[in-house]
Image (cartoon, grey):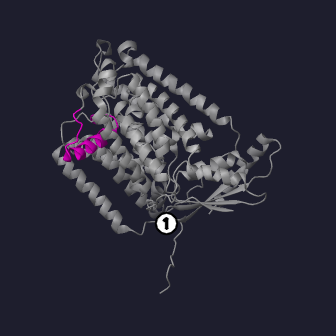
Amino acid sequence: MQAGATTVTASPRLPANTFTIAGALLFIVVAAVFTGQKDFELGAFWLIGIAFGVIVQRSRLCFAGAFRDLIMSGDGRLMRAIILGLAVTTLGFGMLMARFVPDPSFNVLPPGAHIQPVGFATVAGGVMFGIGMVLAGGCVSGTLWRMGEGYLNSWVAMIGILFGLWGASKTWNWWYDIDISKREATWLPSDLGLTASILLTLGVLAVAYVAILWWELRSPRLPEPKAKPAPPAFTLREHLRNSWNVVFGGRGWTYTAGALALAVLSIVAYNLQSPLGVTGGLALWADNAAQVANAGGLPLKGADLLAGCSSAAAGAEWLTIRTTTMTGVVMGAFTASVLSGEFKVRFSRNAARYPQLLVGGAAMGYASVLAVGCTIGAFFSSIPSLAVAGWLYAIALAAGAFIGVQVIRRLP
Amino acid sequence: MQIDVRGEMCPYPAMKAKEALKKLPDGDRLELVTDHAPALSTVPWEGAKLGFLSEIASKAPGEWVITLEKASAPIDQKQVLTAIAARAAELAPDEA
């Protein structure tokens, strides 16, 4: 027997690890039925999480990268795709909110929408999150889907995130008393009306899109090569093979396809109960784990009044729509990466990377409690909720990412 | 020249590629091995800014080799870029 001889198959077709795939799909269905019997929405948000994971794995829709690459290399492709996604989500949320709150001038906030308080904590959280996501190589959702793809780096970052979330829950009262409790969750339609708020949001998104494109074109570069077209199909089998390859083959989806799919998913999620969010569930699990050592920090003071991705849910609950969503993201990304032949356990050989991941993760975890959400809950779900906080958070994220880029340029 | 950035996540593949391209001897090409799918988008971007064309081949499940080669020196940049784009479109169907 020859040692070390490995056969490598190029461009995998139908994956060889059929057992893993069958197991993963079976687990997804069984868990959906099990949670869905308990409560329809638990099961639904598990499947929404799965879809979330599949979408971001296939399209590599990295929110941290959107901010970082814009600053670091003048690459605005991710951010422009996310802006398109935000525009579609805004239209969808607008329709839903018009149904929930027919007259916004009464200062009634639409239930479920991610409308966070606007204050110092939003800015501090955004900057801190921005630095953390650059250090950790991905935001909280990015860490979740890379965990599913087999990145041990992301598992390390997740340990940091959980500690950060727990630490923030323990120190929440200070932030709440000094800032958050005094701030208002500003919803644009309360002042402007729904139509004007939607149009204003779309207008600002359009301006941002063009501005980013302009920024991108400042650095001259070669055009991108065209994707290779699918082979001609004549039989049913060939058609199915081509369709399969569109979803799970090649190098994945375009950013735009991913962002638009995520937009539709967020609208579906909001129609059911609440827009997409992942950190609320993680915060809950971090605290549940800490409670074993009698070191829990929940429930948060005043959290029942906070709209958004918070861990406001009752006591030591393990299954909520937030926790099924976040575990779904990992499972969805795992399944998609196995189906596309991209799953691989990998880790950084540079030992200096691991403290960096822990620190970055902890910063993100802490920040996402302050700002009541991460790049998903307090940005991708907040701007379409017509909340002022989402915009402020986005600017703070960009500032944080700028600082983060300066930091990693000086690290090994 | 060949660099192996397996195990590294964004932004490191693109950063390392940029560093390597800057000290690449004339006429040489860079082969970058990565297992980070987002690098398939960021590395060609950095290369393109420095005038390198990229080609991606899959090496193993979840592993790719990106080959970066210097494009001929542009005189009228816009004209050259348009020509390259047209040629890329022409060649695309033949790419196996």
**x, y (%) of residue A366?**
37, 37
Above or below — where is A248 with respect to A373? Answer: below
Is residue B45 visible in the rendered image? The answer is yes
On the image, numbered disc 1 is attached to which residue?
A12
**x, y (%) of residue A320?**
23, 42
Drawn side of residue A107 relative to residue A39, left or right: right
- Tell me which amino acid carries mark 1: Pro
- Give the chain letter at badge 1: A
Density class for disc 1 (Cα within 10 Å; few <14, some 14-19, many ≥20) is some
The boundaries of the magenta stretch are A271-299
Is residue A76 visible in the rendered image? The answer is no
Picture quadrant of residue B91: bottom right
Above or below — where is B66 with respect to A93? Answer: below
**x, y (%) of residue B53?**
69, 53
Above or below — where is A31 with respect to B75? Answer: below
Drawn side of residue A21 relative to residue A343, left or right: left
